Amino acid sequence: MKDYSNNLGDIDITSEFSGITTESSAVVDFKSDGSYLSQGAYTIAFTSEGFTQSFPVEVSSGTGDWYVEGDRMILSEGFVKMSTGQELISEPGEMIIDELTANKMVLSFSNETTLNQNGYESIVNVSGYYIFTK
């Protein structure tokens, strides 16, 4: 779910989108030593009131550290970026572990970002989940 608010002068515009991954070559390898390696990309299709627009998302090629604290996975770096370079997960990244089995992990996240483009301020709230499989 993505909630997008934009202020154009004295006019506030709010839009709500839902999104689903349509293509994926993304891989995140969570290693037993507490490090991870991420690479790849995926495309997410955002839909709002019958309108659909696709955005490429790049998984930062790199490494970081991870650990579990209660029902949360903490990452030393955010590893997902929009094609604009804007991070979807802040640094450090923190996600809730919704499901964890021997072959599947479901992590949910929520993030609010303020963007300033061409003199206009936009507030973007992104929430969703990642499903990792072995």
Image (spheres, rainbow, N blue to C red):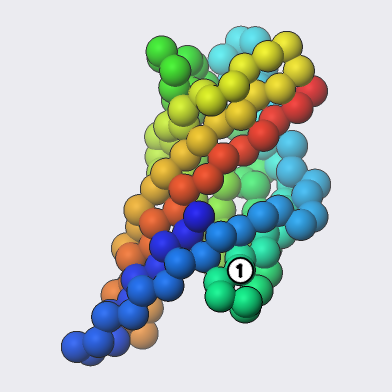
**In this view, 51 is above or below 100:** below
Q: Count residues near mark 1 (Cα–Cα under 10 Å), then give few for <14, some for 14-19, many for 20+.
A: some
What percent of the width, then of the height, locates residue 11? 25, 87
**In this view, 36 is above or below 45:** above
Q: Quadrant of residue 32?
A: top right
Residue 115 in sight from this viewpoint = no
* Residue at point 59%, 22% (across, down): 99
* Residue at point 35%, 53% (across, down): 112
Left or right of residue 10, residue 28 in this image: right
What percent of the width, then of the height, locates residue 128? 53, 45
Comparing 94 with 53, the one in front is: 53
Comparing 106 with 114, the one in front is: 106
Q: Amino acid under label 1?
A: Thr
Residue 22 in sight from this viewpoint = yes
Q: Residue furthest front?
A: 49
* Residue at point 68%, 69% (across, down): 54
**In this view, 31 is above or below 7:** above
What percent of the width, then of the height, locates residue 119? 29, 84
What percent of the width, then of the height, locates residue 14? 36, 74
Left or right of residue 2, residue 5 in this image: left
**In this view, 42 is above or below 5:** above
Q: Quadrant of residue 12?
A: bottom left
* Residue at point 52%, 24% (across, down): 97
| Picture quarter with the C terminus | top right
Q: Secondary structure at mark 1?
A: strand
Which residue was labeled with disc 1?
A: 47
Q: How many marks?
A: 1
